[in-house]
Image (spheres, rainbow, N blue to C red):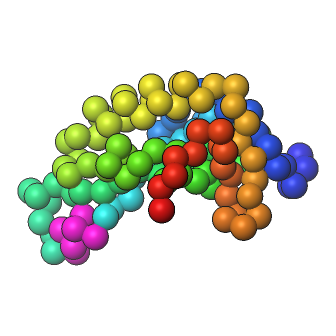
Amino acid sequence: MNSKIDSIVVSGQMVCDEFHTAVGAIRIYRRDDRAGKQARWGGHTNWGYSGYYLASIYDGERWRKLQFNKLVSYEDRSYERAMECPRLEAYLGNVIARWRGLVARYDATSKSFRILPIELNID
């Protein structure tokens, strides 16, 4: 496959594993925020871990970075405790389903894919 893919049609599918292979699928994954990292380093498992979601889009060959922070506000993709993740994943799945048919284009400046028609003005 051509390594210079510059556009991907979004399938509207959200997945949580990297083994999914449908072109245009969006994979979400968790990242600890600062408080979550401190809780893990301190071994405080009973606190739960706070964090947020990031995303990648599948180009048919590999996962490519998606500018998720420009598409979904931090408040709508973050959690205070890990037990909130199933609810948040259901919400994000509904959001991503609405993107079906839109085109994600590679942006050389950010070195990631962006869905310009729906980007929020978040800085």
In the rendered image of this protein, does residue 40 appear above or below residue 58?
below
In magenta, the rendered stretch is: 34-41
Q: Is residue 76 visible?
A: yes
Residue 38 highlighted magenta (yes or no): yes
Q: Residue at x 22, y 68 (%)?
A: 35
Viewer-nearest residue: 63 or 120: 120
In the rendered image of this protein, does residue 118 appear above or below residue 50?
above
Q: Residue 87 at what x, y percent from top left?
A: 28, 32
Q: Residue 117 at what x, y percent from top left?
A: 65, 39
Looking at the image, which residue sits at the far left? 46
Q: Residue at x 76, y 64 (%)?
A: 108
Residue 13 highlighted magenta (yes or no): no
| Left or right: where 17 falls relative to 104 | left
Q: Residue 89 at what x, y percent from top left?
A: 37, 35
| Left or right: where 69 falls relative to 34 | right
Q: Residue at x 16, y 74 (%)?
A: 42
